[in-house]
Every structure is written in C-alpha cells, then in structure tokens.
C-alpha cells in the first residue's frame, strides 16, 4: 500500500467518547491524512496506526475503505488501541495481506484472542475486503492489539465500532432467607445454623437482630463469610416466636433472613396400648403382648417398673422414638393360680410431665380343661 511517514499532530476533538449503553463507530474521516492516529480521537490511544486516504497514500484498489475514503494502517508493527474507559465489544473491518490476530485484554489483565478467518482478503485475492473481526469481554476491554506482518504495512482498519462496558450491578447474596429452630422447654438451645454471605464485589457488612433471643456471629464481617445464627430459648415459654437478621452491606443493600423459633412444651409420655388385658388358661403357653412407649414434644429416655413380680417387660429401658423397638410384656404364669388379677406398669422419664405413666394390667386365669375320658 502507499503510505506517508508518520507525523505527530495536535489532537482533534471528535464526538467518539462512549457513555453507558452506547455504541460508537470511528470511521477516521476527520483525522488528517498521512498522520499518526495517536491520541487525536478523545478516549483512545493508537500506536503504530497511520491515517491513509484513497487517492493519496492508500492503495484503494487492494485496500478499499469500507466507508468514506480514510482508514488506519499498521505502520511500524502491530497496532495497539488503548481505551480510556473499558469497552464491552471491539469490532473492526479489516483488509489484510496476511492472517491477523486480534488480542484483547480486560480490566483483570486477562487476554482474549480472535483470529481472522481468511489468509488474504485484499481485493483481487479472491477474498472479500473489510472482514469483520470482533472481540468481547464481560470484564471490559481496556486494550486491543492487532498483529499482521511483524514489520507492519499489512492491513487496514476501518469503521472501528465499540460498545460501552457497563459494570454489573453490585450483588449481595445470602444463601437462605428463612430458617426454623425447634426447641423444647427446659432443654438446651438448638444448634446454630450457618448461612453464607457473598457479594460482587466483596464488601463489609453488618448483621443486626430484631429480637434479643437471636444472634449472628462470624469471625470477619467481610464477604465471603460464614455466619452462625443462634436462637436461645432460655427464659421463654412454649410457643412460636418470630424474628429476623438484617444483613446490610456498605452499598446500602439489605437482605433479611426470617427466623422462626418453635418452643415445644415439656415431653409427656403415652403408650400403645394404654392398658393390657390377658386371658390365660392353665397349661397353655404363657401369653405375650407388645408395648410401644412414645413421648409428645420430644424424645426421652425412660425405664419401666412393674407393680408385681409376675409381670415382666423386656427390655425395661429405652428411648422413645424408636419405631423398630419391640418391647414385650410377659407373665410368669407359674406364680398364678386360677382367678382375677390386677397389676400395672410404671413408665418413668425424668423430663416427662406425667412421669410415671401408669399402664393398667389385668389378668384372668382359668383352670386347665379336664382331659376327655378322664376318671
């Protein structure tokens, strides 16, 4: 291509600065022909980029502009464009004699690379001039470098189109917004529950309880953080209570975690069946019945005593809530003559309000049936 030596010029003021949610196209028509693009376009800094014009310094037959009569070319090596404000998307229309590599760097200094599709797309080469090449980055592009031939003079760029990068809205997240604690009156507090607090970008935060029985504790009130939420039912009567923890960050974002505390009354015992009735005929196998002991509000340890030694329960101690447990109530029939007997089982549990629970036992023993044909 024809070109003129680079000459530094005073910057021209062009309306090419991006604002939020805006796209802009730089067509280079307002830049002086034969001069370095440099910083002549407000918001951008070009390196190794010279303005060429059709009919003057540009070989427009092989490198036709996409629009107007001016383009920028790589004079002196790879062309670099720096953006004063990050852009979401860089797009350019390139005519090149060699394959191009477009390398973009985002605000976190991460590189993204887009390689042109054609080897040579100059007019007359069989390719289509002004090939569109685009690079995007969620993190906002701060710089692009376009590399063709090592020494330059291998491509032209026209109609550089940029889309403004809009920073994502700050986020503040709690992994749960409601929780329930179950407690039993007179017992220890239920275990703490953990919530995870995250934010983008990270931020300091506070955690304020709406009620005195609810607390939030963490080592560092800076995201990311695990926060232990505890409910202390000490001094509270059975019932259902409601509270909340307000998590607020330095960006005035608040997330509330709703907390329910259920305090059950003291345990009370019950049994199935609530009483036993045995009918036994002398000489028959000893009768056996099953017993299930349960507790309302909370499980408890318990043990069983019998009123009379001829009534037995096996096993005679356990913990409520074990549905697989089979407690057997049996009679020592060798100690019983024919007649009617009344006894009882007594279920004891330290925490139960109705301890001991009395389970009545009645036994009717009849004499053995005489053998047929006996004397």
Image (cartoon, grey):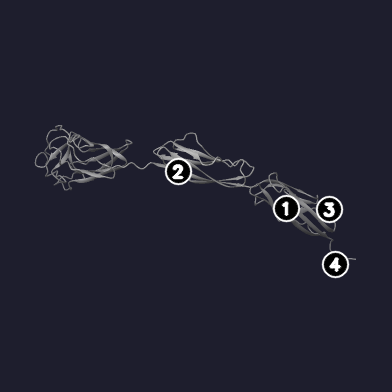
Q: Between 209 and 151, which is closer to the camera in this rendering? A: 209
Callout 2 crowding tier (Cα within 10 Å): few <14, some 14–19, many ≥20: some
Where does residue 233 sit, x and y in percent of width and height? Answer: 59, 42
Q: Are marks 4 and 1 in contact (CB under 8 Å)?
A: no
Q: Between 152 and 204, which is closer to the camera in this rendering? A: 204
Q: Earlier in the sequence, mark 4 or mark 3?
A: 3
> Cα distance, mark 4 to mark 3?
27 Å
> Cα distance, mark 3 to mark 1?
19 Å
Q: Earlier in the sequence, mark 2 or mark 1?
A: 2
Query: Badge 1 is on which residue?
Result: 328
> Cα distance, mark 4 to mark 2?
87 Å
Query: Badge 2 is on which residue?
Result: 255
Q: Secondary structure at mark 2?
A: strand
Tag in front: 3 or 2: 2
Q: Secondary structure at mark 3?
A: helix
Query: In what quadrant of the picture does the N terminus appear?
Result: top left
Q: Earlier in the sequence, mark 3 or mark 1?
A: 1
Callout 4 crowding tier (Cα within 10 Å): few <14, some 14–19, many ≥20: few
> Cα distance, mark 2 to mark 1?
55 Å
């Amino acid at each position: 291509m024809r070109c003129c030596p680079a000459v530094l010029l005073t910057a021209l003021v062009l309306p090419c600065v991006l604002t939020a949610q805006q796209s802009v196209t730089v067509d280079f028509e307002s830049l002086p022909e034969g001069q370095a693009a440099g910083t002549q376009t407000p918001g951008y800094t070009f390196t190794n980029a010279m303005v060429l014009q059709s009919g003057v310094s540009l070989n427009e037959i092989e490198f036709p502009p996409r629009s107007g009569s001016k383009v920028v070319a790589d004079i002196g090596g790879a062309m670099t464009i720096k953006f004063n404000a990050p852009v979401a998307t860089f797009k350019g229309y390139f005519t090149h004699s060699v394959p191009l590599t477009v390398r973009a760097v985002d605000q976190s200094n991460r590189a993204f690379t887009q390689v042109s599709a054609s080897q040579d797309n100059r007019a007359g080469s069989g390719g289509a001039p002004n090939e569109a090449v685009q690079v995007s980055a969620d993190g906002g592009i701060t710089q692009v470098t376009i590399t063709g031939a090592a020494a330059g003079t291998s491509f032209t760029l026209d109609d550089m189109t940029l889309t403004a990068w809009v920073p994502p809205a700050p986020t503040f997240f709690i992994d749960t917004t409601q929780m329930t604690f179950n407690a039993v009156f007179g017992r220890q507090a239920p275990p703490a529950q953990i919530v995870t607090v995250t934010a983008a970008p990270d931020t300091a935060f506070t955690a304020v309880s709406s009620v005195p029985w609810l607390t939030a504790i963490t080592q560092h009130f800076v995201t990311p953080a695990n926060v232990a939420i505890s409910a202390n039912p000490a001094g509270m009567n059975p019932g259902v209570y409601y509270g909340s923890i307000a998590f607020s960050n330095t960006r005035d974002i608040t997330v509330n975690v709703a907390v329910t505390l259920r305090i059950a009354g003291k345990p009370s015992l019950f049994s199935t069946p609530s009483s036993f009735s045995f009918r036994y005929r002398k000489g028959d196998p000893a009768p056996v019945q099953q017993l299930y002991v349960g507790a309302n509000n909370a499980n408890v340890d318990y043990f069983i005593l019998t009123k009379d030694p001829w009534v037995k329960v096996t096993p005679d101690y356990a913990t409520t809530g074990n549905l697989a447990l089979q407690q057997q109530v049996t009679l020592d029939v060798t100690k019983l003559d024919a007649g009617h007997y009344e006894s009882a089982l007594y279920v004891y549990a330290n925490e139960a309000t109705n301890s001991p629970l009395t389970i009545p036992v009645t036994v009717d023993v009849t004499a053995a049936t005489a053998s047929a044909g006996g004397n």
